[in-house]
Image (cartoon, grey):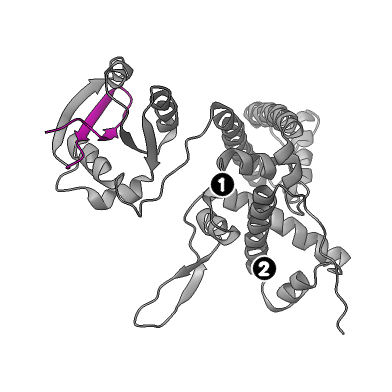
């Protein structure tokens, strides 16, 4: 047996399983480590290729192992599963990772920087708080509807309910129920303040990032979408084309082809769910604006809206926004409004 050249590392909170092989594929290391001994162990090894399944903590360990001189590759867990033999345990998982990382057709996940992860924390916290605010709004609507108080849709309707709860002279709400409704109303208002604070932090980062400002010039892309794209996609050149980026996000039809017969269904909904949601929401805003003001500068969108439902058109436009974003970032360009060319 020779010197270790490739390692599969199965990580957890406190227990790490190492499976190492030499250049001939013979097993050299099969070892379990604690979190405190991990970096010390790898510091004593010669530079080698290390494979890790992508997860939130994998980016931290990837950065730490790269600083020790090793080559680190992160892989989606679903791609590693095919190489798992027999029962699932830490040792078998590490062996599967070691096998998968050497495959020439394997797709890897870029290691995120601390700055990228910090921005993503802002986005994920904001998303959680927005979800909680929606839950509180629905709870207030449901409780007051039981008392015969029905509000309009949207935030204006919720604001009206908050005024009714705060008005002690409104006899439609019993005094015994007003106390618990007031507790929900206070939580709703407090979460709104926290969301506003996060929005300001995201805007500050957006203004300080030149690439994010360039992306924000695309219709349907604002500071929220632009910063999410920058944080989620480290190296845009990892994608060979804008179509590959759109497919990675999950904005392409699901394909089921057999016997030479192509069948395309709805979008795959694989890939990055958060980016897909943001891009579709941004595309929906562009379509709503086009419905009010017309599509003079975007005849393609006008024809699409004429023959497809709004939601289908929004997904198609989101796909195009992703491709435009890729072109802008790879070429170092800025967004330019399309110019109409008169037919000869």
How many numbered tags mark residues here?
2
Residue 312, placed above or below residue 68:
below
Give the SS element for disc 2. helix
Q: Is residue 56 visible?
A: yes
Q: Is residue 16 magenta?
A: yes
User: Would residue 193 be found to the left or right of residue 64 on screen?
Assistant: right
Instruction: Locate the N terminus and report the quarter of the image it occupies.
Output: top left
Q: Nearer the viewer, residue 260 or 90?
A: 260
Question: The magenta stretch spans which residues?
Answer: 1-24
Give the SS element for disc 1. helix
Q: Indicate the position of residue 75 as horizontal and vertical percent values.
A: 37, 43
Residue 14, placed above or below residue 231:
above
Q: Is residue 208 magenta?
A: no
Instruction: Locate the C terminus and report the quarter of the image it occupies.
Output: bottom right
Q: Nearer the viewer, residue 107 or 35?
A: 107
Q: Nearer the viewer, residue 16 or 176?
A: 16
- What label does residue 313 carry, if any? 2
- What label does residue 191 carry, if any? none
Q: Indicate the position of residue 240 as horizontal and vertical percent values.
A: 54, 56
Image quadrant where residue 97 sits: top left
Identity of the residue drawn at 71% across and 40% down: 212
Residue named by callout 1: 274
């Amino acid at each position: 047996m020779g010197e270790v050249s490739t390692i599969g590392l199965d990580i957890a909170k406190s227990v790490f399983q190492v499976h190492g092989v030499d250049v001939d594929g013979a097993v050299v290391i099969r070892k379990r480590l604690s979190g405190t001994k991990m970096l010390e162990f790898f510091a004593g090894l010669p530079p080698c290729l290390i494979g890790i399944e992508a997860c939130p903590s994998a980016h931290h360990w990837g950065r730490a192992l790269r600083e020790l001189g090793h080559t680190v590759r992160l892989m989606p867990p679903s791609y590693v599963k095919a190489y798992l033999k027999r029962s699932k345990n830490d040792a078998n998982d590490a062996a599967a990772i070691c096998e998968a990382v050497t495959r020439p057709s394997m797709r890897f996940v870029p290691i995120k920087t601390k700055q990228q992860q910090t921005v993503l924390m802002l986005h994920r916290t904001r998303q959680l708080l927005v979800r909680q605010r929606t839950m509180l709004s629905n709870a207030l609507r449901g409780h007051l509807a039981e008392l015969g108080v029905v509000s309009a849709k949207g935030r204006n309707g919720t604001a009206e309910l908050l005024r009714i709860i705060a008005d002690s002279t409104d006899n439609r709400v019993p005094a015994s129920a007003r106390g618990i409704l007031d507790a929900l109303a206070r939580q709703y208002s407090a979460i709104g303040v926290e969301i506003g604070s996060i929005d300001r932090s995201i805007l500050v980062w957006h203004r300080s990032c030149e690439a994010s400002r360039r992306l924000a010039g695309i219709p349907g892309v604002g500071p929220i979408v632009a910063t999410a794209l920058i944080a989620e996609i480290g190296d845009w050149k990892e994608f060979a084309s804008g179509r590959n980026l759109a497919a990675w996000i999950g904005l392409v039809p699901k394909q089921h082809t057999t016997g030479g017969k192509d069948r395309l269904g709805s979008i795959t909904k694989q890939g990055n769910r958060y980016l897909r949601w943001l891009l579709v929401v941004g595309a929906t805003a562009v379509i709503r604006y086009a419905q009010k003001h017309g599509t003079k500068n975007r005849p393609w969108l006008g024809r699409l809206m004429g023959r497809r439902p709004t939601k289908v058109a929004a997904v198609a436009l989101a796909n195009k926004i992703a491709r435009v974003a890729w072109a802008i970032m790879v070429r170092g360009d800025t967004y330019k409004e399309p110019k109409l060319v008169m037919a000869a």
